[in-house]
Amino acid sequence: MAIGDDRVTFWFGCNMLRHAEMIRLSMMLLERVGYDVSAVGGPAYCCGTVHDHELQAASNMAARTVARFNEGATRDGRGKVITWCPSCHMHMSDIMAPGNATHFDIAHLSEILSERAARLAPIMNVPVNRRVLLHRHVGFATHVAINSRVVEVLSRISGLELIEGPAHPGHMCSALAAVPGALAAAAEGTWSAAAANSCDTVCTIFHSCHRELAALDGKDNIRIRNWVHLVAESMGIEASDSYRDWRAGEAPSVAAIERAEEKRYRQLVEPELRRPPPLR
Amino acid sequence: MVDHIGLRDFDSRVATDGLRRLAKGETASAETVAWVGACAKSGLCVTACPEQSLGLDAMLLVRVAKQHALNDTHQLSVKHDPTYFPRIKTFARLQLTDEELAKWL
């Protein structure tokens, strides 16, 4: 292994800040397979992909983020940036890297974990007795064989029966939201396949799908988990999921709401948490 | 996605001609704009494109066309959400530790 290969930046993106546990679990998994991890994300590391209507601003954000990754590579030996978000990954590959000089490589978390699955296997020693339908999309395969990579990891979990669900359009559910009927069709396709296959769990790969399907948690006795939750379970690690629980009707603690400022919570968070599910 | 926007039987040559027009900053047919606007990044166009062997990335071309439809021909309306980052930050403050907030917000 070349010097610096085991020092990585984990770039989790913007919207993953809704899912703190998933960020922490991803970091933990990277550490367990031997990486020294520096996690970054949020608005300071915006890729700019949501700013197609403000191209100069998007370009500036992209250049700033690339510069920060370059600095991490040259000053800290973090020559590999590991992505979570498929939008960020594709934007880096297609727009940011061609438009800016880069001193780092990128890879997706699923590629890294599947390549080092042998290191995970000895610690994935707790049976996870679930019958799981994997919620999939056809997109992102242009850049990463995401569905098969996640299957490679999940198939190492003892006790877990894995069924690959129908592959829906788009790279993740958020891409479908703007097209009338598309998101509901994807949710219906996944849920009916889970029910038809007598699954007790639907497993999401990406955060945006998790965000949408979380509202269905418990419907027909089917639970929602993300793939990193399931890997953590196989290590005997508690993998809580606050977003799912809030979306399914629970509320954050009073202390957490006060910390986030109650007015902002009521105006910005509650409407999302109380939004009707994509499937009745 | 074409089924969701009623373009299943639309002439693909007209659609791709519209792509070329948008990429040059010229207006395109309403059908092409609808197709571009409904792109969900499935990537199926990449291998379906007969010009792929010549290096054309059809999904990237659709992306560029969409940017022109938003910013130059204004055939797609901008859906700017000023609450996008404030909402993410509020979710973060509900969950992150002080150390995480200092690093990530």
Image: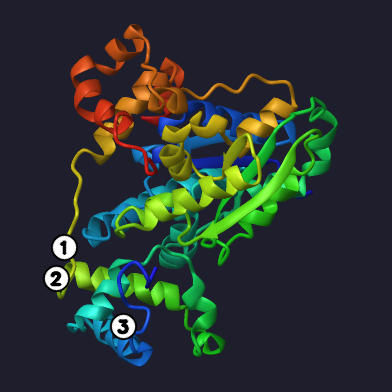
Q: Quadrant of residue A257?
A: top left
* Residue at numbered disc 3: B19
Work out whether residue A79 can be spotted. Answer: no
Work out whether residue A253 can be spotted. Answer: yes
Disc 1 crowd, CA 10 A, few/some/many (<14, 14-19, 20+): few
- Which residue occupies the foreground of this view, A78 or B7? B7
The chain carrying label 2 is: B
Q: Looking at the picture, how far across and down is residue A217, in whole percent?
A: 49, 31
Amino acid type at mark 2: His
The residue drawn where x is 56% and y is 59% is: A167
Mark 1 and mark 2 on one chain = yes
Q: Looking at the picture, how far across and down is residue A246, in whole percent?
A: 40, 23
Amino acid type at mark 1: Ser
* Residue at numbered disc 2: B74
The residue drawn where x is 24% and y is 30% is: A271
Number of residue marks = 3
Residue at mark 3 to residue at mark 1: CA–CA distance: 17 Å
The chain carrying label 1 is: B
Disc 2 crowd, CA 10 A, few/some/many (<14, 14-19, 20+): some
User: Disc 1 vs disc 2: Cβ atoms closer than 8 Å?
Assistant: yes
Residue at mark 2 to residue at mark 3: CA–CA distance: 15 Å
Vertical position of residue B96 compared to residue A98: above or below: above
Q: Is residue A12 left or right of residue B28?
A: right
The residue drawn where x is 62% and y is 39% is: A227
Q: Which mark is residue B77?
A: 1
